[in-house]
Image (cartoon, rainbow, N blue to C red):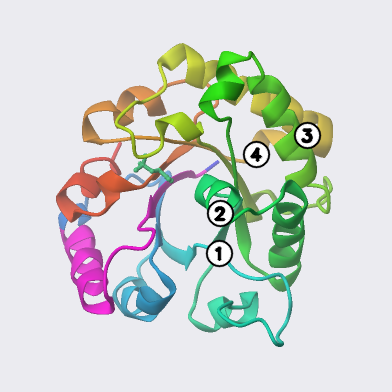
């Protein structure tokens, strides 16, 4: 299975800034990108085209949308459709990022609708899951992982092409806080995720990458990548600067 080294730029960078960063990432990684790793960048919508212009035609480089609305078109002010992302050459989209869930109130069910609709339209989907601090303190990590996977994958079955799906485990308390989950916490959650994926998707589950996200940086990325059932990373803050992201990507 290919490892996915993903950058989530959130609401950062104008098109010009995004193009510069993408160009610099490609330059710094020239000849260093391991054959079993892919780079995936999620720019804000307004910078997708600029990033696409830099990455297109480069093997191992992909880009995607941070969000979409699960409808073909219509009166949905402020939203974009999967078709619009595909039109900009996006291969991937995120669904269920904790900021979508907790800042914008997206339900487990809506996240599941997005995953199913995106796949149906031809996007590869990265489903984000993860518990809040109070849920970890109340010993509910496995319960949250199970619930979010069940709802997030409600419209997906074991016939799904494994390369079109990835799961990102991102404990909410570790996102943007500098507080990275410890190796045991990551291993345990990723194993629980794999077990639940097997329950939901049978043997296909073993070919689906499980990414870790939450304060990943160059200093901790390789240790995290070595853990069982960690098949990539989803990086926010440390992906904004090309030198730091390119320090995370290579093996
Ligand atoms: P962070 O964000 O690396 O800044 O913690 C990760 C994410 O939100 O995907």
User: What residue sits 42% from the left and 16% below the top?
Assistant: 183
Q: Do the residues labelled 2 and 1 touch (CB within 8 Å)?
A: yes
Residue 69 on the magenta segment: no
**What secondary structure is found at the residue carrying circle 4?**
helix
CB of mark 3 near ligand 1 (< 8 Å): no
* Marking on residue 100: 2
Q: What stretch is highlighted in magenta?
A: 2-27
First in sequence: mark 4 or mark 1? Answer: 1
Task: Name the residue carrying label 3.
Answer: 203
Q: In which quarter of the image is residue 59?
A: bottom left
Q: Nearer the viewer, residue 214 or 116?
A: 214
- Residue 198 at x, y = what percent? 77, 30
> Is residue 108 in view?
yes
Most foreground residue, 108 or 45: 108
Identify which residue is drawn at 30% across, 63% down.
Answer: 12
Q: Find the distance from the CA under tag 1 to the CA under tag 3.
A: 28 Å
């Amino acid at each position: 299975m290919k490892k996915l080294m993903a950058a989530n730029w959130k609401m950062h960078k104008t098109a010009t800034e995004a193009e510069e960063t993408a160009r610099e990432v490609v330059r710094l990684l020239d000849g260093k990108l391991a054959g079993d790793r892919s780079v995936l960048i999620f720019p804000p919508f307004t910078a997708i085209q600029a990033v696409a212009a830099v990455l297109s035609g480069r093997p191992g480089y992909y880009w995607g949308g941070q969000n979409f609305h699960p409808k073909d078109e219509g009166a949905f002010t402020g939203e974009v459709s999967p078709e619009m992302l595909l039109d900009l050459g996006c291969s991937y989209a995120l669904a269920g990022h904790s900021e979508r869930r907790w800042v914008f109130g997206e339900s487990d069910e809506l996240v599941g609708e997005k995953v199913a609709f995106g796949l149906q339209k031809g996007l590869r989907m990265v489903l984000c899951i993860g518990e809040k601090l109070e849920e970890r303190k109340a010993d509910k990590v496995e319960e949250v992982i199970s619930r979010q996977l069940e709802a997030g994958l409600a419209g997906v079955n074991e016939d799904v092409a494994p390369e079109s799906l990835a799961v990102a485990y991102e404990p909410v308390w570790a996102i943007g806080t500098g507080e990275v989950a410890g190796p045991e916490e990551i291993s345990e959650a990723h194993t629980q995720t794999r077990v639940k994926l097997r329950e939901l998707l049978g043997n296909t589950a073993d070919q689906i990458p499980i990414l870790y996200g939450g304060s990943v940086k160059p200093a901790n990325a390789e240790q995290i990548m070595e853990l069982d059932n960690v098949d990539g990373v989803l990086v926010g803050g440390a992906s904004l600067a090309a030198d730091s992201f390119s320090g995370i990507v290579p093996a």
